Amino acid sequence: MIASIRRSLLRLAILVLGTAPAVAAAGSVDYGGQAELSADAATRAATVSAPIIAIQPLALDFGLVTVGETGGVDYTVRNTGQADLEITGIDISDPQITTNQPIPMILGPGDSFVATAMFTPIGGDLSATLLFRSNAENGDYTIL
């Protein structure tokens, strides 16, 4: 029984040691203790640590709003990345829509902000988009 356990531990040690070079292939350490990442690993690390914008809901439904009145819908802007998200502008395609979101705005990693989009109809159909301009890794973000 003890011999069987020792053989299993030896196999486990060989298995772990056998995978170590694959893990170390992402970088190297010189004798002075300086670590270097490969260019590919450094790019992946930078991507993971970049800001990422997420907005919910993806579509704003104002329901029925009478001409001359205003209807509002809340939306949440969230930074799901690991670096500061800088929102530099919001392009709104229809003048019947406004928002109270302050611009420019910086959201730290994991932070969020609840804003309100307001619809004040002047007549006709509404087909609008809100385009959020930022430094997010996933680019500018549009909601309907």
Image (cartoon, rainbow, N blue to C red):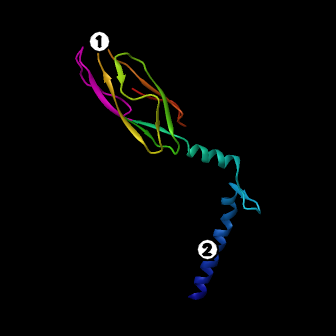
The residue most toward the top is 123
Instruction: Classify mark 1: helix, strand or loop.
Output: loop
Q: Position of residue 30 (x, y in %)?
A: 76, 60
| 27 relative to 40, above or below | below
Tag count: 2
Quarter-of-image position of residue 66: top left
Q: Quadrant of the N terminus?
A: bottom right
Q: Is residue 96 left or right of residue 79?
A: left
Q: Main secondary structure of the magenta part?
A: loop
Q: Quadrant of the C terminus?
A: top left
Q: Position of residue 34 (x, y in %)?
A: 72, 58
Q: CA distance from mark 1 to mark 2?
A: 73 Å
Instruction: Classify mark 2: helix, strand or loop.
Output: helix
Q: Is residue 63 magenta?
A: yes
Q: According to the image, label 2 marks what residue?
A: 12
Q: Position of residue 78 (x, y in %)?
A: 42, 39
Question: How many C-alpha atoms fall within 10 Å of the one at disc 2: few (<14), some, or many (≥20)?
Answer: few
Query: Residue at position x 24%, y 20% from top?
Result: 65
Q: According to the image, label 1 marks what residue?
A: 122
Q: Amino acid at mark 2?
A: Leu
Query: Residue at position x 37%, y 19% from top?
Result: 127
| 48 relative to 102, above or below | below
